[in-house]
Image: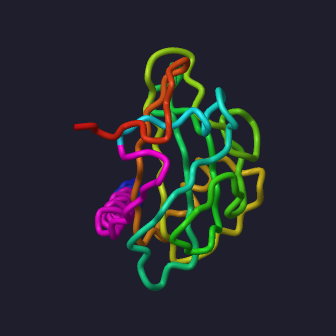
Amino acid sequence: MRKVALIVLLFITGCVSQAEETKKALVEAEELTVSSPAFRHNGNVPSKYTCEGENVNPPLEIEGIPEGAISLVLIVEDLDAPRGIFVHWVVFNISPVTIIEENSVPGVEGINSFGNNFYGGPCPPSGTHQYVFAVYALDTTLTLDPTVTKNDVVEAMEGHILAKGELIGLYSKGQSHGFLSGLSYC
């Protein structure tokens, strides 16, 4: 009985140690700067990039990609969806580029919460929602196919994240969100 207890204790200690290593690796990841010429951080996403417009992905600019980065991952999520986080886009195996073009398919697209393998723009049922455009630089490519979800991609990224960054955009239906939304005017 003591041998079983000792083995369980060693296993638990190993799991805790492994979890701490993963957490440490995430904390030590370098910072990417993610921005867009279409909207500012915490600014309004123009309707062009939503279900009320052309429903195409906005252009993104990425700075600070570390040497050794082999691929990027982009995950776009609505943090304020009524039933929890809603995934709008999952793209992996993106070449480590500094620009993701508007209306593009920069890598392999996984399945979003709409059940599709393509970008689905902001489309909140009510109120203003926060949309996170998170970019991760990895030291590998992911051997996954297009039937994967965000959770599969996140699991495959573990231990491979060199840098991360995010851009947050806001959107509410029925409001005019022009190109210069979110800018302060003097």
- 30 or 144, which lies in front? 30
x, y percentage for residue 27?
29, 62
Position of 134 compared to 64: left or right? Answer: right
In the image as oriented, which residue stretches furthest toward the front? 186
In the image as oriented, which residue stretches furthest toward the top? 126
Q: Residue at x 41, y 69 (%)?
A: 63
x, y percentage for residue 180?
43, 41
x, y percentage for residue 140?
58, 76
The magenta stretch spans residue 67: no
- 97 or 102, which lies in front? 102
The magenta stretch spans residue 23: yes
Q: What residue span does the magenta drawing correspond to?
A: 12-41
In the image as oriented, which residue stretches furthest toward the bottom? 67
Residue 144 found in image quarter: bottom right
Position of 31 compared to 129: left or right? Answer: left
- 154 or 47, which lies in front? 47
Q: Is residue 6 visible?
A: no
Q: Residue at x 55, y 50 (%)?
A: 75
In the image as oriented, which residue stretches furthest toward the left? 186
Q: Is residue 22 visible?
A: yes
| Residue 88 drawn above or below residue 36 | above
- 159 or 71, which lies in front? 71
Q: Residue at x 63, y 46 (%)?
A: 89
| Residue 49 drawn above or below residue 157 | above
Q: How is the image coloured?
A: rainbow
Q: Quadrant of the C terminus?
A: top left
